[in-house]
Amino acid sequence: MTALPVAFGAAGMVFVGGSVAVSGHLTDAPLLTVQALRYAAACLLLVAWARWFASASVPPPRNPARGAALHRARGAALHRARGAALHRARGAALHRPRGTEWLWLLGVTGTGLLLFNVALVRGAEHAEPAVLGVAVACVPILLAMGGPLLEGRKPAARVLAAAAVVTAGAALVQGLGRTDATGLVWAFVTFACEAAFTLLAVPLLGRHGPLGVSVHTTWLAAVLFGLAGLLLEGPAAAGRLRADDLLAGAYLAVAVTAVAFLLWYTCVARIGAGRAGLLTGVAPVSAALVGMLLGGPPPQPLVWLGIATVAAGLALGLTERRTGAARSPAAMIG
């Protein structure tokens, strides 16, 4: 298995896990308005990246006066290089969604972004954070089952076993907490929305690629959060934002949205949703370690055991050699 897409997915989850401490600074801010600004800024960054990358990937035409002999000698190599560059440029191109793609995009945005954030806020009113964290930690199992089915393959037993190990390790890192019945409902909603963020994007990766999916989900999220903010927080909510709110929102926009989305969807497109789902176990590990680096207490022995368990699950699920030519998600829709 190529190490680079695995590193991309792990890095994306490190950003997500590290955002826990940053998000704590937004508890008193108008949340919907901050989220709208966050996703709008992330979308602008992604569009700028797409335009720059598309233009930078295509080399300028060679000067024909350099001689026919040199042209013949380098012709094949130049043709291959330009072909690869054009392929990369097409990968950075943005396409207008069509037909049922709108439904998939609205599903990713409405569940994986809008409803997920609502579930976190409402769930926190009835359950301790660890309960919601454990719910999210169960996502690798669902991705290990549902991801391959969406990609036209059967779930792999080894990946399913690895997902169970990663989930157990993440639960140890998070710990357990108290909740009531309503909190359990919101925990399940959080779990389903987190899985939907990946699974509903799989049919879109073939035509739009990681960059296109990231762009379309962020502008849709900006619109949805913006409308909700206007209705529930009022048009003057942006004026109530403090400097630290803007700094936290800027970090979420750049690292946790623009960068992390692109890294995550690239990983999903390259290694499949099932194996990529194992990397969600990196997020609670990152949160625990970042908390310690920011001055928090060192992790307890049970947390270190959980970190070791997550590492064992990742090793089990990501080191299997594939037999046969399994289709990637990007090959599903042409």
Image: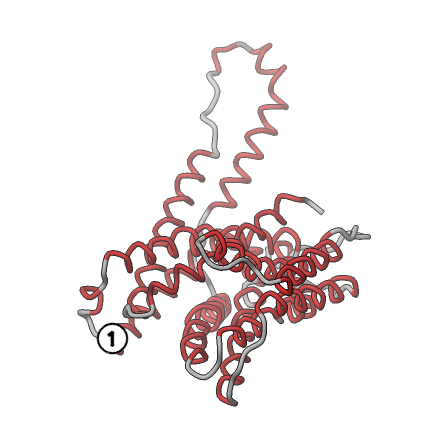
Residue where numbered disc 1 is placed? 233
Looking at the image, how many numbered discs can be counted on the residues? 1
Q: Report x, y in % for residue 247.
A: 30, 54
Residue 154 can be seen, yes or no: no
Which secondary structure lies at badge 1? loop
Q: Report x, y in % for residue 331.
A: 64, 54
Which residue in the rendered view is the most extreme toward the bottom? 181
Q: In this view, does 30 lie to the left or right of 155?
A: left
Q: Which of 160 and 109 is in front in this view?
A: 160
Q: In this view, does 268 lie to the left or right of 19?
A: right
Does 170 sit above or below residue 56?
below
Q: What residue type is labelled 1?
A: Glu
Residue 124 can be seen, yes or no: yes
Judging from the image, the colouring scheme is: secondary structure
Quadrant showing the C terminus:
bottom right
Q: Report x, y in % for residue 229.
A: 28, 72
Residue under the image location 48 percent in, 45 percent down: 92
Residue under the image location 47 percent in, 56 percent down: 18
Does 196 sit above or below residue 320?
below
Residue under the image location 57 percent in, 15 percent down: 71
Residue under the image location 34 percent in, 57 percent down: 248
Which residue in the rendered view is the most extreme toward the right? 323
For disc 1, the neighbor class at 10 Å (few under 14, some 14 to 19, many from 20) is: some
Q: Report x, y in % for residue 78.
A: 58, 24
Q: Quadrant of residue 156?
A: bottom right
Q: Which of 250 and 22 is in front in this view?
A: 22
Q: Nearer the viewer, residue 107 or 247?
A: 247
